[in-house]
């Protein structure tokens, strides 16, 4: 299996698997090491791995975690999946792994009936903005952006606003994604 973006490729050694609780600490470390994403508690990642494995994905390369996406279906809007975080190990960045992980989730049985993908991104996180715009383009869907959480909602006063990216409607069959 090859995923191409530009001149670089992710080779067939990447495996997409459902996360296990045993992955939680390593996922926490991977997110911490980016220095960009909001770092949640280890407990949060353990919960995601244990209770939401069908809508999250781990990318493994040579036994190491090369990437992780946390996501969940919105109970009040079952046609929508919300992507919480996307992280790719530094040595795997720029190869399309983030997009490939998102597509992997959209192909899963747990996403049957999903027509929209939502996520929030800060204005300064240009790599994530590009990732979600690229996904929308790849699957032939619109990408609408609107303010979701203004900066003043964050008590520490050092957090940027979060913009809502809404991708959809997702019309392609799962095999085409």
Image (cartoon, rainbow, N blue to C red):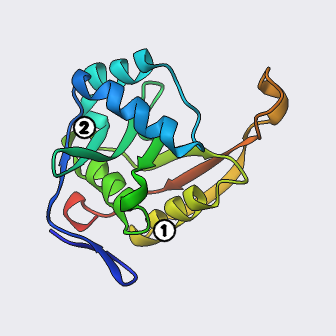
Residue 120 image-quadrant placement: top right
* Residue under the image location 76 percent in, 40 percent down: 161
Determine which of the numbered discs, if any, sits on residue 110 in the image.
2
Q: Residue 87: percent from the left, percent from the top?
A: 44, 46
Nearer the observer, 67 or 165? 67
Quadrant (top left/top right/bottom left/bottom right) for the N terminus: bottom left
- Above or below for 173 versus 18: below
Residue density around tag 1, few if under 14, some if 14–19, many if 20 or more, within 10 Å = some
Residue 103 image-quadrant placement: bottom left
Task: Give left or right: position of 37 versus 154.
Answer: left
Residue 170 appears in view: no
Determine which of the numbered discs, if any, sits on residue 89 in the image.
none
Q: Residue furthest bottom?
A: 7
Nearer the observer, 114 or 128? 128
Q: What whole-number distance in Å separates the C-alpha atoms at marks 1 and 2? A: 23 Å
| SS at circle 1 | helix
Q: Which of marks 1 and 2 is nearer the N terminus?
A: 2
Q: Residue 26: percent from the left, percent from the top?
A: 33, 32
| Count of numbered labels shown in the rendering | 2
Q: Which residue lies furthest to the top in this view?
A: 43
* Residue under the image location 41 percent in, 15 percent down: 43
Nearer the observer, 89 or 132? 89
Q: Residue 101: percent from the left, percent from the top?
A: 32, 53
Q: Which residue is identified by label 1?
A: 134
* Residue under the image location 83 percent in, 28 percent down: 157
Nearer the observer, 101 or 114? 101
């Amino acid at each position: 299996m090859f995923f191409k973006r530009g001149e670089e490729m992710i080779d067939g050694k990447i495996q997409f698997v459902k996360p296990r609780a045993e992955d939680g600490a390593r996922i926490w470390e991977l997110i911490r090491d980016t220095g960009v994403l909001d770092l949640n508690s280890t407990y949060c990642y353990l919960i995601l791995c244990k209770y939401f494995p069908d809508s999250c994905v781990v990318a493994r390369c040579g036994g190491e975690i090369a990437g992780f996406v946390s996501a969940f279906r919105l109970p009040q809007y079952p046609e929508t999946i919300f992507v919480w975080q996307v992280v790719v190990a530094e040595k795997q960045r720029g190869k399309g792994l983030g997009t490939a992980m998102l597509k992997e989730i959209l192909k899963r049985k747990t996403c049957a009936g999903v027509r929209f993908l939502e996520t929030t991104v800060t204005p300064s996180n240009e790599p994530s903005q590009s990732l979600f715009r690229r996904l929308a383009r790849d699957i032939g869907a619109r990408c609408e952006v609107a303010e979701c959480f203004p900066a003043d909602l964050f008590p520490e006063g050092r957090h940027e606003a979060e913009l809502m990216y809404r991708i959809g409607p997702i019309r392609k069959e799962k095999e085409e994604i």
